[in-house]
Image (spheres, grey):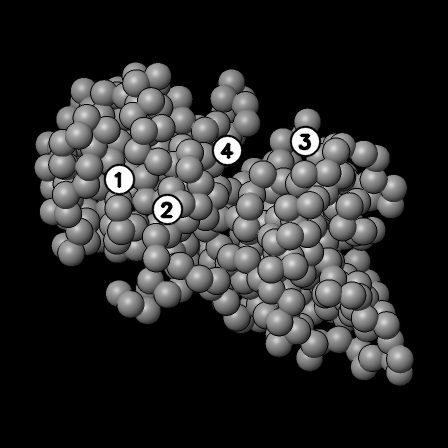
């Protein structure tokens, strides 16, 4: 419920600059380079759009999970299917949620993009994909995810948490 | 059916470490399938108020079923192209029906009144019907809008997938997947590209 309220709040907020968020317009090779860049223990890739309600509803959980686990080597890569002229809106939404990781608006052929993430995915939004630190896909969620979904499947890939690691407020 | 429904309605978790190979099923009924018997004669309300089934619209040259809706920006971007293809190939022996399986309580824009308005404004000459349980979409294994299923004159699924390779810029389309498949089926041939995929909105299944 909190996620829904937060998503609604983000939607209703007036347009404003979003420091810390820079959304790149990119084709799949550049996006995959961000996904597979060394240093992460696990990488979550989420495909969404600013107008997609289930996408907006899951986004607060995704970003909170990322913040809570990035010290353990989690990377979150957000890929928007918005049109280029919606970049400001994409940045506003992600900025309001405090996201500061890699974010893209996808360009290029849909089938190439879809098959690079998971050939079994038909392209419906939202979708989230889990890769291990070597860039091998280990899990796909075709539909909206929750914090608990992610905790159940991602934690095993992450480094051990340090003592007193802070958690994001719900 | 129950299992398939639960996968499509809720989140589908797909595990597996390796990348699936080319030609792996993209979901939905497989190529060569017939219209699922359980829903072939399911009557659905058309925008003109009449009840229509897929069996009712079966064409001599083939049958095209497209799951689409009113609210989805992807479906909107392709809408004019879908209607033009549908109207054109309906005149070439292809039976066509557009199916809205979305729950309008999720998006009011997907309601019947808006379907009627859209059909009128777009000049649809083919049925645009309500799948009021989402049962037809479930039986097809459809999960995204827009998603096309083209059956040949023998009633076998010859093409499944998206419309073309450029949703955003119609004048820059290079691969007209559905049009090419329609031409092949009308000509009694198998489409050269029988399965494609495109980004789209997840179908908002009714409960």
Q: CA distance from mark 3 to mark 1?
A: 31 Å
Q: Are marks 3 and 4 in contact (CB under 8 Å)?
A: no
Looking at the rendered structure, the secondary structure element under dot 3 is: helix
Viewport quadrant of the N terminus of chain B: bottom left
Question: What is the crowding at mark 4: few (fewer than 14 residues within 10 Å), some, or many (at least 20)?
Answer: some
Q: Chain of mark 2?
A: B
- Nearest to the eye among marks 4 and 1: give it: 1
Image coordinates of residue B14 in percent, x first then y, are 50, 67
What count of labels does the image hold? 4
Q: CA distance from mark 3 to mark 4?
A: 13 Å
Image coordinates of residue A126 in percent, x first then y, are 55, 51
Residue under circle 1?
A: B130
Question: What is the crowding at mark 2: few (fewer than 14 residues within 10 Å), some, or many (at least 20)?
Answer: many
- Nearest to the eye among marks 2 and 3: give it: 2
Closest to the observer, A142 or A148: A148
Would you say B203 lies left or right of A74 here?
left
Using the image, tell me which numbered label, if any, was put on residue B103: 2
Image coordinates of residue A140 in percent, x first then y, are 55, 63
Pointer 4 or 2: first along the chain: 4
Would you say A76 lies left or right of B80 here?
right
Residue under circle 3?
A: A86
Looking at the rendered structure, the secondary structure element under dot 1 is: strand
Q: Chain of mark 4?
A: B
Image coordinates of residue A32 in percent, x first then y, are 70, 51
Q: CA distance from mark 4 to mark 2?
A: 16 Å
User: Does A44 sit above or below residue B185?
Assistant: below
């Amino acid at each position: 419920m909190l996620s829904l309220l937060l998503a609604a709040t983000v939607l209703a907020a007036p347009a404003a600059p979003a420091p810390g968020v820079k959304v790149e317009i990119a084709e799949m090779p550049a996006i995959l380079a961000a996904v597979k860049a060394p240093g992460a223990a696990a990488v979550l890739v989420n495909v969404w759009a600013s107008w997609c309600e289930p996408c907006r509803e899951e986004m607060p959980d995704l970003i909170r999970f990322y913040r809570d686990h990035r010290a353990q080597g989690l990377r979150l890569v957000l890929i928007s299917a918005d049109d280029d002229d919606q970049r400001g809106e994409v940045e506003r939404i992600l900025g309001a949620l405090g996201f500061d990781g890699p974010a893209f608006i996808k360009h290029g052929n849909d089938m190439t993009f879809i098959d690079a993430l998971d050939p079994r995915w038909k392209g419906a939004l939202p979708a989230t994909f889990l890769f291990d630190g070597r860039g091998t896909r280990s899990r796909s969620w075709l539909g909206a995810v929750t914090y608990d979904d992610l905790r159940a499947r991602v934690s095993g890939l992450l480094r051990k948490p340090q003592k007193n690691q802070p958690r994001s407020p719900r | 059916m129950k299992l398939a429904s639960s996968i499509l309605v809720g989140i589908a978790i797909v595990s597996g470490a390796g990348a699936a190979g080319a030609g792996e099923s993209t979901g939905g009924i497989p190529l060569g399938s017939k219209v699922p018997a359980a829903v072939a004669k399911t009557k659905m309300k058309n925008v003109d108020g009449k009840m229509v089934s897929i069996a009712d619209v079966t064409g001599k040259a083939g049958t095209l079923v497209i799951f689409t809706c009113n609210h989805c920006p992807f479906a909107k971007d392709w809408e004019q192209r879908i209607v033009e293809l549908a109207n054109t190939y309906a005149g070439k022996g292809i039976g066509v029906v557009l199916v809205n399986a979305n729950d309008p309580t999720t998006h009011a824009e997907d309601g019947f009144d808006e379907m009627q308005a859209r059909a009128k404004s777009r000049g649809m000459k083919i049925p645009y019907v309500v799948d009021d349980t989402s049962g037809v979409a479930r039986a097809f294994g459809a999960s995204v809008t827009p998603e096309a299923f083209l059956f040949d004159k023998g009633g076998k699924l010859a093409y499944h997938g998206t419309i073309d390779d450029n949703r955003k810029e119609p004048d820059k389309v290079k691969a007209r997947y559905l049009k090419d498949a329609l031409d092949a089926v009308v000509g009694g041939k198998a489409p050269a590209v029988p399965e494609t995929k495109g980004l789209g909105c997840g179908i908002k299944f009714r409960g």
